[in-house]
Amino acid sequence: MACHRLLRILARIEDGGPGPARLCEVSADLMAMTGAGIMLMSGEVPRGSVCSSNEVSALIEDLQYTLGEGPCVDAYRQDRPILEADLAARGAARWAAFTPEALAAGARAVFGFPLHVGAVRLGALNLYRDRPGPLDDDQHADALVLAGVAARAVLAMQAGAPPGRLGTELEGGADLRFVVHQASGMVSAQLDVSVGEALIRLRAHAFADHRPLDEVAQDVVGGRLRFA
């Protein structure tokens, strides 16, 4: 990427004020995508969405969080870009649960880019388009830069926060599912399994009952649902 293009990206992000939402708006605009989202992850567990540029982006983030699969999840776990130029193509359904729901929402091509600063992985940048087609070389290079900018922006927003607490900007703009994390811990204790396994059980229950994961988690936390 030419230096002036990098400076243009940074200027666009800073213009209009800082904040998580700005990262996604600028990412979608500069990449000529239909939408963009940023997901935070820790270990093998998605923590929630930092931002999304529109309703479909928000749904795509929610699907990945609820189902535990999709471009952001794979990009984070494999620490490499995940590029799906046509979700509807024969043989392209690498995500059995995510793909039909994403297609129904209007996404046709999806791209995930890991967020990391040095050896520290934070999550992934998700880009989607409502028509099929691969990224060209310039778009791919730009997305890598954007992912780096986003990772550093997330760290900056978290800087100075007390241990175990979110930074003010992240807390105000992110959609992080604390109730799900709390429920996962409770199910982990009930079943004597890892927190990761407990989250899988929560997801399976939500999927089988056709309910949002948040609602199932609220039932666990409220004592209305037990797994043992």
Image (cartoon, helix red, strand yellow):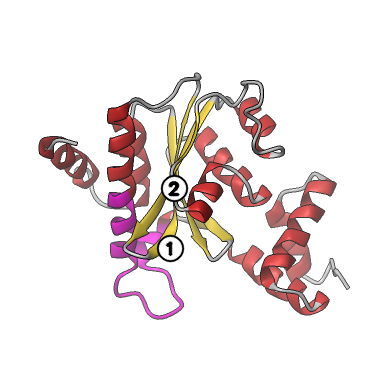
Looking at the rendering, which quadrant does residue 225 occupy? bottom right
Residue flagged by tag 2: what amino acid is it? Arg
How many residues crowd around disc 2 within 10 Å: few (fewer than 14), some, or many (20 or more)? Answer: some
Residue 59's spot in the image, x, y percent?
Answer: 58, 39
The residue tagged 2 is 80
Q: Secondary structure at mark 2?
A: loop
Q: Is residue 113 left or right of residue 62?
A: left
Q: Residue at x 71, y 37 (%)?
A: 96
The residue tagged 1 is 171
Which residue is more in the foreground, 17 or 38? 38
Q: Does residue 49 appear in this view?
A: no
- In space, the residues marked 1 and 2 are separated at their CA atoms by 28 Å
Q: Is residue 33 left or right of residue 73?
A: left
Task: Look at the image and give the residue range highlighted in magenta.
Answer: 148-172
| First in residue order: circle 1 vs circle 2 | 2
User: The N terminus lies in which quarter of the figure?
Assistant: top left
Q: Residue at x 68, y 56 (%)?
A: 214
Q: Secondary structure at mark 1?
A: helix
